């Protein structure tokens, strides 16, 4: 993977126009005051690699914070938030022409959308791998947590095919699940992440959370019931047959 340093060097490389050897420094937008984020957004859209590099650096902390929020402690051991942010920056550089806004808030929202999709892609890949190795174990132990087979969403992950449409459906479902988890009480969300995304046995979850078997089972049952409501069980691909 392209290193962060190499990526910044690429962004800061002088840009030449098609018809001349004019550099970024000859661009009036670049010669002007680029201290404000708005000016950086405008200059970046006008083709300044230097401005884009500076602009993305300003949003790195914000995106890292979001990536950490979307990924549990256990998931961060396997999915590096910094890598997800770096992929997002590479996509931002590639797709900048598709950005229609001009304000810092609009740019932040644009980056956030890409970051969420990249987190969903990483989670989708991880969960599909986890699904293959833990599907039997999840079914065998689900009743111990007071849950029925329809609540084992990791074992029913949609879009199992590797076709573009299948991948898109799977990533959309993962993204919807992430958003729903953030609406649960933290203890319920953490129990569900550990049980169904990490595939941990009940005993290890009890030790990890410092709660009794009964308490963890209750968190899982209530959390899954809430998720089914949030994800609209009648139409959500998570609960389809």
Image: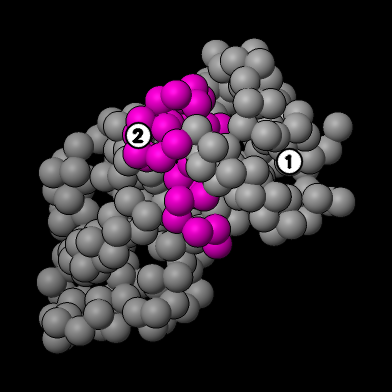
Identify the disc placed on residue 110. none
Q: Which-is-in-front pick, marks 2 and 1?
A: 2
Question: Going from the N terminus, do you reach mark 2 or mark 1 first?
Answer: 2
How packed mark 1 is, by other alpha carbons closer than 10 Å (few <14, some 14-19, many 20 or more), is: many
In the rendered image, the quadrant that contains the C terminus is: top right
Instruction: Inspect the magenta stretch and tell me whether residue 196 lies in it.
Output: yes
Give the structural element (helix, strand or loop) at label 1: helix
Q: Can you give x and y, in whole percent of width and height, for residue 168 in the image?
A: 66, 41
Q: Can you give x and y, in whole percent of width and height, for residue 26 in the image?
A: 15, 74
Using the image, determine if residue 206 lies above or below residue 114: above
Say left or right for 54 vs 193: left
Name which residue lies at 74% across and 57% down. Answer: 229
Using the image, determine if residue 179 lies above or below residue 220: below
Residue 79 visible from this viewpoint: no
Name which residue lies at 70% across and 34% down. Answer: 147
In front here: 183 or 91? 183
**Residue ID for mark 2:** 208
Q: In which quarter of the image is residue 22?
A: bottom left
Q: Which contiguous range is marked in magenta?
A: 183-212
In front here: 169 or 5? 169
Name which residue lies at 35% across and 34% down. Answer: 208
Residue 44 visible from this viewpoint: yes
Q: Can you give x and y, in whole percent of width and height, for residue 5 in the image?
A: 13, 44
**Residue ID for mark 1:** 238
Q: Are marks 2 and 1 in contact (CB under 8 Å)?
A: no
Q: Main secondary structure of the magenta part?
A: helix
Q: Can you give x and y, in whole percent of width and height, for residue 155 in the image?
A: 67, 26
């Amino acid at each position: 993977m392209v290193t962060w340093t190499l990526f910044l060097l690429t962004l800061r490389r002088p840009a030449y126009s098609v018809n001349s050897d004019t550099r970024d420094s000859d661009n009036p937008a670049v010669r002007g005051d680029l201290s404000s984020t708005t000016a950086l957004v405008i200059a970046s859209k006008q083709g300044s690699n230097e401005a884009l590099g500076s602009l993305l650096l300003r949003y790195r902390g914000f995106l890292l914070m979001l990536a950490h929020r979307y990924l549990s402690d256990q998931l961060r051991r396997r999915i590096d938030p910094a890598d997800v942010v770096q992929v997002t920056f590479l996509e931002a550089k590639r797709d900048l022409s598709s950005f229609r806004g001009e304000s810092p808030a609009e740019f932040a929202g644009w980056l956030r959308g890409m970051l969420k999709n990249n987190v969903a892609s990483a989670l989708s890949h991880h969960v599909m791998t986890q699904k293959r190795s833990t599907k039997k174990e999840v079914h065998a132990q689900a009743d111990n947590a007071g849950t029925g087979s329809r609540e084992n969403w990791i074992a029913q992950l949609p879009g199992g095919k590797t076709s573009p449409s299948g991948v898109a459906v799977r990533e959309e479902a993962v993204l919807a699940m992430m958003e729903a988890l953030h609406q649960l009480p933290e203890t319920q969300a953490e129990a569900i992440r550990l049980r169904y995304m990490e595939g941990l046995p009940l005993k290890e979850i009890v030790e990890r959370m410092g709660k009794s078997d009964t308490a963890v089972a209750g968190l899982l049952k209530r959390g899954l019931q809430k998720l089914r409501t949030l994800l609209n069980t009648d139409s959500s691909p998570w609960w389809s047959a």
